[in-house]
Amino acid sequence: MKGLNRAEICDVNFQEFVRGWNGHAQPRPAPGEAILDGSALDARGFRELFESQLISRHLDLMARVLRVQNKVFYTIGSSGHEGNAMVARATRHTDPAFLHYRSGGFMAERFRKLPGMDPIMDSALSFAASAEDPASGGRHKVWGSKPLWVLPQTSTIASHLPKALGTAIAIEAGKRLGTGLPVPEDSITICSFGDASANHATAQTAFNAASWTAYQKLPAPVLFVCEDNGIGISVKTPAGWIGESFRHHPDLDYFYADGLDLAAGYGDVLRAVEHCRRTRRPTFLHLRTTRIMGHAGTDFEIEWRSLEELCAVEASDPLLRSAAIALESGLMTQEEILALYEDIRRKCFSAAEEADRRPRLTTLGQVMAPLAPYTPDEVQAEAARVPALEARIKAFGGEDRLPERQPPRHLAIQINQALHDLLAKYPETLLFGEDVAQKGGVYTVTKGLYKAFGSKRVFNTLLDETTILGLAQGFANMGLLPIPEIQYLAYLHNAIDQLRGEACSLQFFSNDQFRNPMVVRIAGLGYQRGFGGHFHNDNSVTALRDIPGLVVGCPSRGDDAAMMLRTLAALARVDGRVSVFLEPIALYMTKDLYEPGDGQWLTAYPPPEQALVLGEERVYDADATDCVIFTFGNGVPMSLRAARGIEKKHGWKVRVVDLRWLVPLNHAAIAKHAGECERILIVDEGRFSAGIGEGVITAITEAGFGGKPLKRVVGADTYTPLAGAAFLVIPKDEDILAAADALA
Ligand SMILES: Cc1ncc(C[n+]2csc(CCOP(=O)(O)OP(=O)(O)O)c2C)c(N)n1
Ligand SMILES: [Mg+2]
């Protein structure tokens, strides 16, 4: 027995259990009657749930067999968790679901909610990584479905909880805003996960944020379903831990259901779902499950667990219990169960064989097609669409106060005006973050928005960046246009998985069926005089550089900032994209360029029909060819000043290129300027390693201009110290001059 494959043992166990059953069968219940005393399930309900469980089980068994033949590429299964089908039955297909990877039963059951859908074939296509997989287009084995409102999840455990909560809150926010919801107004969101995952910081933050919301009597209709099998890979959850830690969690209403027993569990599942829907309160459903057949096909439990223990786990197989219920209640005979079992096995195998014959992704173009869609003409047209004059007048408080009628202003004011314009243009826009509402942000960049647009659209969140980005995803899922703020770049890093692993991956893993467009405003970079230290002057853009699909824009002046925001909002609306708008704090209030009082860094507010083109640089002195300086952010005014000094000393005419768009870098534009100019300087206020400057050098070198005289002026690989010493670690005007000297 020890050498045997445990999947085969579970398979045989089921058949032997049914064949060997010799209990007493009750008379078959009448239609609509409870299957067993006290059960909330009737005959049809039980029969369908049982079938969903069997579909889930046979998909697992099929995957184990066909994996070794290279026809299936995923073996993390749902065996022992099939009772989660009850949650699908008790909810609607329009209740957005964010699922645990052991949700085969849930999916099979949810497929019943719409006619003409085939859970077996759809799942088989995903297992086979077929390009025709309706969930991800062959990019991953995921549980997902556009018509069934199952948003595909990555396998970073717990990372989906913040956005599930965000989506629940968004249902209520959308209702209040009256801009229309893609799901019924009384929908709830469902979010399942394992017992070990419940300990993860990302999960804990979602539980806390849900409670924080409910504590204030604000609705947050999320159903957290903890599928407690008592183990995470090989680490046991202390017995009783989930019940102990969640039964008394404030403002998170705890329900328990036996997921191993449909007859006993269904009523409790129903109660939890009804509670969540009716009260709109965050609800924690502790669902008892077990894990059979190991963590995945590669997990040979027999090597690290005792045989006695394995046999005990296998004896708790929920399918044995379902078979017993079917027999005891007189609903099915032994022959009927075995025939159904074999029929589903046959369907799963034939679907898998068919899926294996379907095309797979064969080119890089196919793989990347849904990652970062971009339709430039539509984006440009949308960016240039002017908000209604009436709405603008209301937002700015009078026609004479329209910003394009005001004198030139600095960056902070122009961002503020542009945000007013965006909120006026898009009634579905929400702006939120820490301190952004009444206070108007740490630097007053969001000042007046709360007053102009009200607390439904401009609000403070709790102090948690993971939740802020989870909320953004949730709002976006419900069709709103979120503009979250991360107060300082340094505070993004603890929550960056919500961008890297979640928001930016949704279009990719859903084959662009789901989109979570957003514009994330982040204040950052160095050079603040007399303030800060590291955490307020963080200059690490590197962490954003390699996030697939992300767009990062960094304006250095007010007019560019306003036009960039219009483009980013249009990119979100038209192509569903996620972007970061990186605001150089030290330039917020900068008014002068060359001399104190020259006012040369003030800009006129661009008329509302003007926008930037994604990727397009701003060029100062385009005719200069002696030297080009590539830079961005604080580097732009520094380089413009240095350009004067260089001309004075070396007689070179200097072209300054403000990249403006940091991710993705415009390699073609960089190559063009590098090709046209004799010498090259790069001024990168980020870090020495893996900063933007490295990307610029790569673009130059790959274009064949690596042989030209080139110098990079760049920050050091260090944290930023407090006070005057901060300027030792980042480029200064003199450093640019010195680099030019070295080129001479
Ligand atoms: C953030 C993160 N850390 C680690 C892992 C690796 N990992 C995948 S599943 C898993 C165990 C999860 O256990 P549990 O939440 O109880 O779910 P179960 O598999 O038991 O259903 C671990 C550690 C991961 N996917 N994501
Ligand atoms: Mg577990």
Image: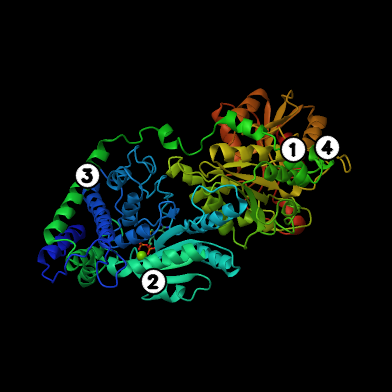
The residue type indicated by label 2 comes to Tyr
Whether label 3 touches label 1, CB < 8 Å: no
Q: Is residue 183 left or right of residue 99?
A: right
Q: CA distance from mark 3 to mark 1?
A: 64 Å
Picture coordinates of residue 53, whole percent (x, y): 27, 57
Secondary structure beneath dot 1 equals helix
Q: Which residue is mark 3?
A: 69
Q: CA distance from mark 3 to mark 2?
A: 41 Å
Question: Which one is in front in this view, the residue at disc 3 or the one at disc 2?
Answer: 2
Q: Which residue is mark 1?
A: 389
Residue at image coords 77%, 26%: 653
The residue type indicated by label 1 comes to Leu
Q: Is mark 3 within 8 Å of ligand 1?
A: no
Q: Which mark is residue 405?
A: 4
Q: Name which of mark 1 and mark 2 comes first in the sequence.
A: 2
Q: Is residue 213 left or right of residue 243?
A: right
Q: CA distance from mark 4 to mark 2?
A: 62 Å
